[in-house]
Image: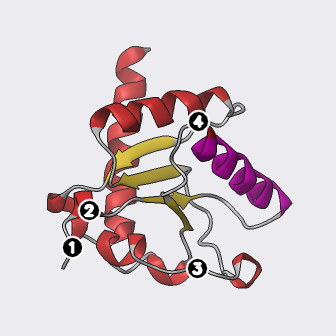
């Protein structure tokens, strides 16, 4: 099995597959091009991924976006793998500049989380995110 840092993926959990998401994909691809990050594979979270491990999800191949059954409703989370800390921060900063009101939560794919079910990780991450937001208020 390859090491996590040897792979470069963005697993995007979002709310539905429509023109907005396809438009967002084009924005993400353009952003990656500007950041010399075209090597990153963008993957959207589907219904069948929710019960699978994070590792399985980020290694899913998606060729036909229109045929995907996007998992919903999901919070907007982007799992990143294969990037250095500096590359992640650069991507997050650039990504957030292109977002509207509803902000995306970012998480790194790490060995301790790789075998956990995606559904469990989404709950953990959003719980931590809510805790951080309430501490800022």
Q: Quadrant of the N terminus?
A: bottom left
Rounded to the nearest whole Å, what is the CA distance between mark 3 and mark 1? 19 Å
Name the residue that disc number 3 marks.
Answer: 62
Q: Which residue sits furthest top?
A: 137
* SS at circle 1: loop
Secondary-structure class at tag 3:
loop
Tell which residue pokes out farthest to the right in this image: 19
Q: Are marks 2 and 1 in contact (CB under 8 Å)?
A: yes
Mark 2, Cα crowd under 10 Å, few <14 / some 14-19 / many 20+, is few
Label 4: which residue? 95
Q: Nearer the viewer, residue 12 or 87?
A: 87
Q: Is residue 6 above or below residue 61?
A: above
The image position of residue 124, as x and y in percent, is: 31, 52
Q: Quadrant of residue 44?
A: bottom right
- Residue contact between numbered discs 4 and 1, judged by CB atoms under 8 Å: no
- Chief secondary structure of the magenta portion: helix
Q: Residues within 10 Å of mark 4 (few under 14, many from 20)?
A: some
Mark 4, secondary structure of its residue: helix
Earlier along the polypeptide chain: callout 3 or callout 4?
A: 3
User: Pointer 1: residues within 10 angstroms few (<14), some, or many (20+)?
Assistant: few
Q: Residue at image x 32%, y 65%?
A: 120
Mark 2 in CB contact with mark 4 (< 8 angstroms): no
Question: Which range of residues does the magenta coloring cover?
Answer: 19-33
- Mark 2 or 3 closer to N-term? 2
Q: Is residue 63 above or below residue 104?
A: below
- Disc 1 target residue: 2
Horizontal side of residue 136 vs 32, given as left or right: left
Magenta residue check for 70 = no
The disc, 4 or 1, on the residue closer to the chain's N-terminal end is 1
Q: Which residue is mark 2?
A: 6
């Amino acid at each position: 099995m390859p090491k996590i840092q040897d792979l470069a993926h963005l697993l995007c959990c979002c709310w539905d597959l429509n023109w907005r998401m396809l438009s967002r994909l084009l924005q993400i691809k353009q952003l990656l091009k500007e950041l010399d990050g075209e090597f990153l594979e963008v993957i959207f979270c589907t219904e069948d991924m929710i019960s699978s491990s994070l590792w399985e999800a980020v290694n899913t191949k998606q060729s036909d976006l229109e045929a995907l059954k996007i998992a919903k409703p999901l919070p907007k989370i982007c799992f990143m793998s294969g990037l250095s800390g500096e590359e992640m921060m650069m991507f997050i900063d650039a990504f957030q500049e292109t977002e509207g009101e509803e902000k995306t939560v970012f998480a790194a794919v790490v060995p301790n989380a790789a075998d956990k079910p995606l559904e469990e990780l989404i709950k953990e991450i959003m719980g931590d995110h809510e805790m951080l937001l309430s501490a800022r208020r």
